[in-house]
Image: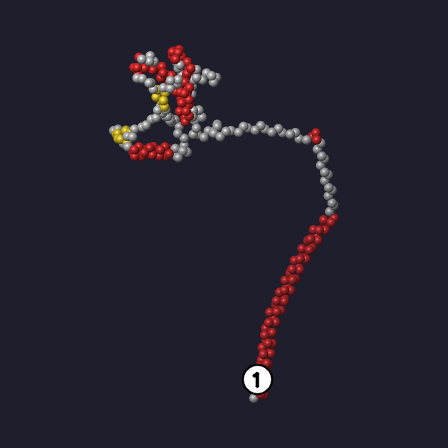
């Protein structure tokens, strides 16, 4: 039994040794091929490096024999008398105030009247020249019901209807919507249009017209003319003496000499 086991073990070792020899014989060609490829790569690299070294040596050789260029002479200093003349600075243009002289298409430069200041100017003139204090500002209160006249078509008969509070608000919104559409929300300016501003003053008398003439011996027309001259000087921006006719100057000068002299002290 022991002899058979030893013989079997020897047989297995012989088979393993033969298997190992066969495996080594199969791997030997692969190793040789890899060694040959490495040798070829090294030889190709050495062949490429040789021409490069030759080119570098050929380029460096003339540089050794080339003559050294002489240094350029330094530029001569400029004497003080030949220095460039100084250029005088151009005068600065005065800065323009914003809104002055700018043509934005929406401001009428010829109109120099600020209409929002007209009521205050009128009050100041009346305090100075209305000695009796008979002129009073008047508040305009429109009626609650308006009458609208319109035509439904170009050739239709005119129609009329009453407008209440809600109708007035609706018509006002329609008018502003139309202005907004025509001007493209303010991008376009309206030309050849007129804006009417109503400023109302009332000349009051303490008595009736008949009693003012008969009892006080006062001509109410002269008082009203004085008020008109004051208002016209503010609205038109002119002196009262320049707005009356020559044949009326003497008559108005008898009662309104101080009013006709408005603007003379400014000259």
Q: Which residue is mark 1?
A: 8
Q: Residue 111 falls in which quadrant of the image?
A: top left
Toward the viewer: 52 or 238? 238
Q: Nearer the viewer, residue 249 or 78?
A: 249
> Is 97 displayed left or right of 128 in the figure?
right
Residue 98 percent across, percent down from the top left = 49, 30
Outermost residue toward the bottom in this view: 1
Residue at the image position 26 percent from the left and 31 percent from the top? 161
Q: Could you tell me residue 19's position as x and y percent?
A: 58, 77
Q: Residue at x 34, y 19 (%)?
A: 204
Give the vertical position of 67 relative to 13 (above or below).
above
In the picture, the quarter occupied by the N terminus is bottom right
Residue 155 seen anywhere in this rendered image of the structure: no
**Is residue 67 left or right of 153 when viewed as pictured?**
right
Using residue 143 as the reference point, say whether residue 250 is left or right of it: right
Work out whether 97 lies above or below 32: above
Kindly identify the residue that appears in the image at 42 percent across and 15 percent down: 258
| Above/below status of 110 relative to 36 | above
């Amino acid at each position: 039994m022991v002899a058979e086991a030893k013989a079997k073990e020897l047989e297995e070792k012989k088979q393993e040794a033969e298997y190992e020899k066969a495996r080594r014989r199969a791997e030997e060609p692969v190793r040789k091929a890899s060694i040959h490829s490495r040798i070829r790569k090294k030889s190709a690299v050495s062949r490429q490096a040789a021409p490069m070294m030759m080119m570098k040596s050929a380029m460096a050789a003339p540089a050794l024999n080339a003559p050294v260029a002489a240094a350029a002479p330094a530029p001569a200093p400029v004497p003080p008398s030949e220095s460039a003349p100084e250029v005088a600075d151009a005068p600065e243009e005065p800065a323009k105030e914003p809104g002055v002289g700018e043509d934005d298409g929406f401001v009428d430069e010829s109109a120099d009247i600020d209409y929002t200041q007209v009521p205050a100017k009128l009050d100041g003139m009346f305090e100075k020249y209305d000695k009796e204090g008979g002129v009073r500002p008047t508040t305009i209160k429109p009626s609650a019901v308006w009458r609208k006249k319109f035509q439904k078509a170009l050739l239709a008969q005119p129609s009329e209807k009453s407008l209440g509070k809600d109708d007035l608000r609706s018509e006002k919104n329609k008018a502003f919507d139309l202005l907004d559409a025509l001007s493209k929300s303010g991008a376009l300016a309206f030309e050849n249009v007129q804006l009417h501003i109503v400023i109302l003053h009332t000349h009051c008398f303490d008595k009736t017209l008949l009693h003012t003439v008969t009892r006080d011996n006062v001509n109410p027309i002269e008082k009203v003319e004085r008020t008109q001259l004051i208002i016209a000087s503010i609205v038109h921006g002119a002196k009262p003496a320049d707005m009356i006719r020559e044949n009326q100057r003497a008559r108005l000068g008898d009662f309104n000499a101080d009013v006709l002299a408005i603007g003379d002290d400014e000259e």
